[in-house]
């Protein structure tokens, strides 16, 4: 039995439904064809089995987790197991009363997304009027004494406002600010031309974020996530496949990352049929990219193989068509020219408007 | 209540900030300090120090307590170790001064 690995974090994707339609959504692009959501009792069992397996932290996310009307029971269940319970939300739809209930039931922290520091731009990106309500939600979170993380996905249309985004986070008294460049998988890959910033944009933003990180140390944690497309080496995606994270998606499939089931040829089981420990230790999909035996060249002999584990499988597949390839984000990858071409494309498109394909239940909708 | 500055006075009464939660890990016998999106796996000494960060104990009391459990280490070394550890927690926004 492969029990070498212990998951610390459960990412509970409670639903793919969402009132927003951000063009970089990390949900699968075929959300419309997905099956039924698993029921409350199954989620409560998943929480218990996750804790028994070693999980200490749970992210309740989606889609928009607020659309589940059993969220109260799941928060209560997670807290009963002494799990550090984080709600990852757009803030819609939410009332102060419901948030107070979450707090009373033991919610530990809230991560709230903003699409931009500017109301009209935030609403345009989200595809729905939402900015003003998000500001209210941020106030409620802090007035209840809950820790607040602001998450802003950065891309070429908003990366220049980074100083304003930091101001917004300070005005909200956020405890943590995630300036997360879009990761080009899922919907963001579909919209890559409209989203990928230029190197110049990125470097300016990075410098501004770094100054804020130093200035705010001890008050607000500022995290700047560089896009892989401008890194010399890939990220250790999910801290390595099946090493520290379990994702359970709305249909109950247990996964090493939120898009692993969109990769061809991999088999994952469902929590309605199996105990989570069996899935984690034994499901073929979880074991496929554990360890080093599977590594391709040049990762196989690379000194960084135990740091980045060959990079992101989804990115490797999207760019090369091969699930087991070295992540092309790596400068050592034989396919790195695909990344260079995308960067060049971003430079060529600088300053020109590109339309988004918004996520929708029906497929693409160009607006 | 204010965030604890990286320079921590011996009379400060450190307390974990609301975003941090200490959780005993029955699999390892150590304490985990959990906070949004992160966790720190504490060794026995760090766990002991953090357990005393309740806002009731002054920094010098924490040092004295630890000196009692590790007689082989000089009080000056303990003082320095505690101070560095608490400064590291404070830099992550995990401590408040409860004077």
Image (cartoon, rainbow, N blue to C red):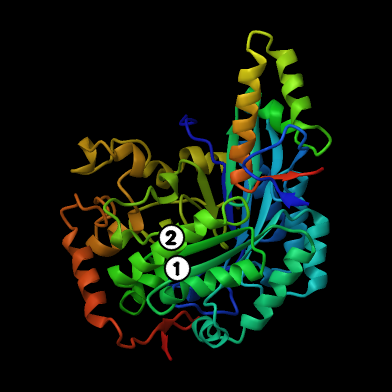
Quick one: A204 or A358, which is closer to the camera?
A204
- Cβ atoms under marks 1 and 2 closer than 8 Å: yes
User: Is A28 left, or right, of A57 in this rendering?
Assistant: left
Using the rendered view, name the quadrant where residue A265 is placed: bottom left
- Which residue does the numbered mark 2 point to in the structure image? A259
Residue A28 location, quadrant? bottom left
- Identity of the residue drawn at 58% across and 38% down: B88
Mark sitting earlier along the chain (1/2):
1
Of A220 and A41, the residue lying toward us: A220
Residue A210 locus on image (x, y percent): 45, 58
Position above or below: B4 against A22: above
Residue at (59%, 45%) from the top-left corner? B91
Q: Tag 2, which chain?
A: A
Q: Position of residue A56 (x, y in %)?
A: 64, 42
Report how many numbered discs are placed on residues in the image: 2
A128 to the left or right of A162: right
Q: Residue furthest bottom?
A: A367
Q: Residues within 10 Å of mark 2 (few under 14, many from 20)?
A: some
Residue A32 lies, in percent from the top left, at 49, 76
Residue under label 1, please give it. Answer: A28
Mark 1–mark 2 distance (CA, rounded to whole Å): 6 Å
Which residue: 47% across, 38% down?
A282
User: Closest to the observer: A70 or A180?
Assistant: A180
- Please name whichever residue, B75 or A295, is drawn nearer the observer in this view of the structure: B75
User: Residue A172 shows which numbered tag?
Assistant: none
Q: Is residue A288 above or below residue A361?
A: above
Q: Secondary structure at mark 1?
A: loop
Point 72% across, 53% down: residue:
A108
**What is the x, y in percent for residue A328?**
24, 57
Q: Secondary structure at mark 2?
A: loop
Label 1 packing within 10 angstroms: few (<14), some (14-19), many (20+): some
């Amino acid at each position: 039995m492969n029990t070498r690995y212990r998951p610390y974090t459960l990412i509970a994707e409670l639903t793919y439904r969402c009132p927003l339609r951000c063009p970089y959504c990390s949900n699968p692009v075929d959300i419309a064809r997905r099956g039924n959501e698993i029921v409350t009792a199954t989620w409560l069992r998943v929480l218990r089995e996750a804790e028994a397996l070693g999980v200490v932290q749970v992210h309740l996310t989606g889609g928009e987790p607020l659309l589940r009307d059993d969220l109260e029971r799941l928060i209560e269940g997670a807290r009963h197991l002494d799990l550090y319970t984080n709600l990852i939300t757009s803030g819609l739809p939410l009332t102060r009363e419901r948030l107070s209930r979450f707090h009373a039931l033991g919610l530990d922290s809230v991560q709230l997304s903003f699409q931009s520091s500017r109301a009209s731009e935030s609403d345009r990106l989200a595809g729905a009027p939402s900015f003003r309500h998000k500001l209210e939600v941020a106030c409620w979170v802090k007035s209840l004494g809950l820790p607040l993380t602001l998450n802003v996905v950065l891309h070429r249309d908003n990366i220049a406002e980074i100083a304003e985004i930091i101001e917004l986070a300070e005005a909200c008294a956020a405890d943590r600010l995630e300036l997360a460049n879009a990761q080009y998988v899922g919907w963001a890959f579909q919209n890559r031309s409209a989203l990928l910033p230029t190197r110049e944009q990125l470097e300016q933003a990075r410098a501004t974020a770094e100054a804020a990180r130093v200035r705010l140390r001890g008050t607000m944690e500022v995290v700047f996530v560089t896009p892989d497309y401008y890194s010399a080496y890939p990220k250790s995606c999910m801290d390595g496949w099946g090493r520290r994270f379990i994702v359970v998606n709305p249909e109950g499939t247990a996964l090493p990352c939120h898009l692993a089931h969109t990769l061809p040829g991999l088999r994952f089981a469902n929590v309605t049929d199996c105990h989570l420990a069996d899935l984690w230790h034994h499901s073929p999909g979880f074991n496929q990219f554990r360890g080093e035996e599977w590594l391709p060249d040049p990762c196989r002999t690379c000194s960084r193989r135990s740091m980045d584990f060959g990079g992101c499988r989804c990115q490797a597949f999207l760019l090369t068509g091969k699930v087991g390839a070295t992540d092309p984000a790596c400068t050592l990858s034989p396919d790195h020219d695909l990344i260079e071409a995308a960067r060049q494309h971003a430079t060529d498109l600088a300053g020109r408007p590109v339309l988004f394909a918004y996520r929708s239940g029906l497929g693409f909708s160009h607006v | 209540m204010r965030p604890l500055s990286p320079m921590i006075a011996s009379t400060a009464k450190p307390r974990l900030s609301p975003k941090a939660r200490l959780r005993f890990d029955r699999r390892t016998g150590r304490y985990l300090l959990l906070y949004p999106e992160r966790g720190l796996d504490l060794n026995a000494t760090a766990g002991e120090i953090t357990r005393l960060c309740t806002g009731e104990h002054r920094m010098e009391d924490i040092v004295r307590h630890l000196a009692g459990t590790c007689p082989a280490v000089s009080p000056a070394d303990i003082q320095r170790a505690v101070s560095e550890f608490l400064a590291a927690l404070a830099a992550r926004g995990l401590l408040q001064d409860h004077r």
